[in-house]
Image (spheres, rainbow, N blue to C red):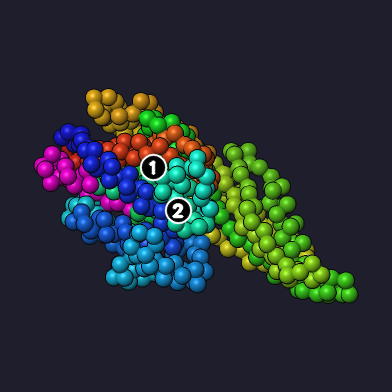
Amino acid sequence: MDAAPVLAPELACQIVRWRREFHRRPEVGWTEFWTTARLAELLGAMGLSPRLGAEMLDKDSRMGLPPEAALSQAMAEAVRPLGDLPGARPDLLSRMDGATGLCVDLAPDKAPGVVLRCDIDALPVRESQASSHRPAREGFRSLREGAMHACGHDGHMAMALGAVRLVLDQLSQGRARLSRNVRLLFQPAEEGVRGAMPLVPLVSGWPYFLAGHIGLACPETGSFAAGVTGAFATAKFNVAFQGREAHAAQAPEEGADALKGACEAVLAIHALPRHSRGEGRVCVGRLEGGSGRNVVPGFARFEAEVRGRPQEVCDFLFERAKAAVEGIALANGLGVSFELAGQAGAAESDGALAARLARIAQGLSQDGRPLFSRVLEQARISVSEDACTLMREVQQGGGQASYMLFGSDLAAGHHAPDFDFDEAVLAKGALMLACAVLDLAGPGDFRL
């Protein structure tokens, strides 16, 4: 990198506008049709040629898909205007072929350099309408009831777009050069760790991989962590019991109680033994079943997850959960199906790459002041992240990967109805991302 780019006030304001636009039209995992089309429009206007949906990923490798009816409804809704936001262009939806997300290369004629991954999905959370909630007060609350960008992915998209704009401006003005390609991945379905696996071929063999998040272990504006440690490996799964309905008073012995089996399985999962090698987590987040108070339940299902660090702890809990479910089904005369709905491994940021990113961050300034008031090489997190699947692929191929944290004051915790962040982080994040990719893919000594 010849010199750090300068983020003009006009671009800083545009990044905020992008964030608020995405915030108003959230879409949950694998239904991000409008979001993908809008990203493609914006990147196309920058002179880039993104690949969309099925153009970049294998549709059959997706996990945890919504029902086909929900996908069809999301596609139909995407083309319709919502408020003052226009619908998605039909030609872009056609190119997606029923899949979401996109990939774009800044220097496709050059050898692989650095991948920058950005998540794009929202959560099934009904956003607060309270006057104390800034998006509601300032008019950019979600227009889709029951869906909300409650984890900052709207900000991640805006920062990535700002970084692309900065890099392209530097290149066009001759202030920077790329000796390697820079690949942007706008990943669908991060929530529930469902979207990274189909994107593995897009990072395989690349020397550097970057991802990041607003907040988490950096909940103060001005802080920055160049890497993380402590991410949990996780497996998300759905269990369905098939029983036999019968009259609950006249002939209960003729039934097979699926809901009883599910309840036993929930308790068994929470009672799983822990592992001496590390920490584990279990959670059953949803349970449903039966058809009426006087009918022996003929069906029941629940959604659950296990987490662990290191990887073997997660694997241990997952296999024990499956064994418990199968044993309970057998003991109660029930049929059972077990669906893996999402999965991510544990990964640690590479120390050398994190140190390099920290040096970049420490050297950045804005209006004569340091861009970040506090820079850490590593921060510890206690969540699971779909990016870990992509990080592990790059690391196992001999490359380096790091997951950054962009500090921000938070109005409430992640996934809460009143979640919001300090938009001052957006300009800082965009500048840091631009400088990172220019440094890693620039004309200097390319090294690992």
Q: Which disc is residue 63 wearing?
A: none
Looking at the image, residue 193 sits to the left or right of residue 168; the answer is: right
Q: Is residue 171 magenta?
A: yes
For numbered disc 1, what is the local secondary structure?
Answer: strand
Looking at the image, residue 345 sits to the left or right of residue 422; the answer is: right
Q: Nearer the viewer, residue 155 or 314?
A: 155
Looking at the rendering, in which quadrant would you find the N terminus? Answer: top left
Say which amino acid is labelled 1: Gly
Give, as a single range, the part of the protein colored magenta: 165-185
Q: Residue 39 lies in what quarter of the image? A: bottom left
Q: Position of residue 115 (x, y in %)?
A: 30, 48
Looking at the rendering, in which quadrant would you find the C terminus? Answer: top left
Looking at the image, residue 219 sits to the left or right of residue 172; the answer is: right
Q: Earlier in the sequence, mark 1 or mark 2?
A: 2
Q: Which disc is residue 142 wearing?
A: 2
Query: Can you see residue 123?
Result: yes
Estimate the spatial distance between the alpha carbons at disc 1 and disc 2, rounded to whole Å.
23 Å
Q: Is residue 99 magenta?
A: no
Q: Position of residue 322 (x, y in %)?
A: 64, 58
Q: Residue at x 46, y 47 (%)?
A: 136
Q: Which residue is mark 1?
A: 212
Q: Residue 288 lies in what quarter of the image? A: bottom right
